[in-house]
Amino acid sequence: MKALTATEMRDVDRLTTERYGIPSLQMMEAAGKNVADAILRDFSPALPQRVTVLCGKETMAVTA
């Protein structure tokens, strides 16, 4: 699997928004929720049942 650079990821986000009309905020919320869900699924019950994901320069928080 190839990891994208920050520049490449910005391009992917921009193209997705332009081509499919998916707002950037909606993509970020979905990404954060999926990360939180994976953490809860893979590490529960060792962790509390609440996860907050912080990411990006503008730091967006998603709690699941």
Image: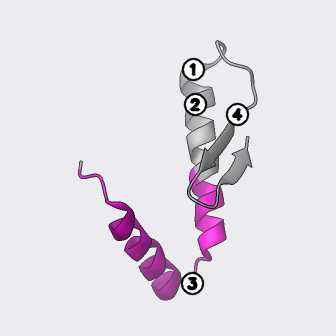
**In the image, residue 14 above or below residue 27:** below
Q: Are marks 4 and 1 in contact (CB under 8 Å)?
A: no
Q: Residue at x 56, y 42 (%)?
A: 35
Residue assigned mark 1 = 43
Q: Residue at x 63, y 28 (%)?
A: 40
Q: Which mark is residue 51?
A: 4
Q: Is residue 17 toward the left or the right of residue 45 in the image? A: left
Q: Is residue 51 toward the left or the right of residue 12 in the image? A: right
Question: Could you tell me which secondary element the residue under label 3 belongs to?
Answer: loop
Q: Residue at x 65, y 67 (%)?
A: 26
Q: Main secondary structure of the magenta part?
A: helix
The amino acid beneath tag 2 is Ile
Q: Tell me, yes or no, whether the highlighted magenta stretch contains residue 6.
A: yes
Separation of residues labelled 1 and 2 (CA atoms): 6 Å
Quadrant location, the C terminus: top right
Q: Earlier in the sequence, mark 4 or mark 2?
A: 2
What's drawn in magenta, residue-wise? Answer: 2-31
Separation of residues labelled 4 and 3 (CA atoms): 29 Å
The amino acid beneath tag 4 is Val
Separation of residues labelled 3 and 1 (CA atoms): 34 Å
Mark 4 vs mark 1: give the one in front. 4
| Residue 36 place in picture, x, y as percent | 62, 39
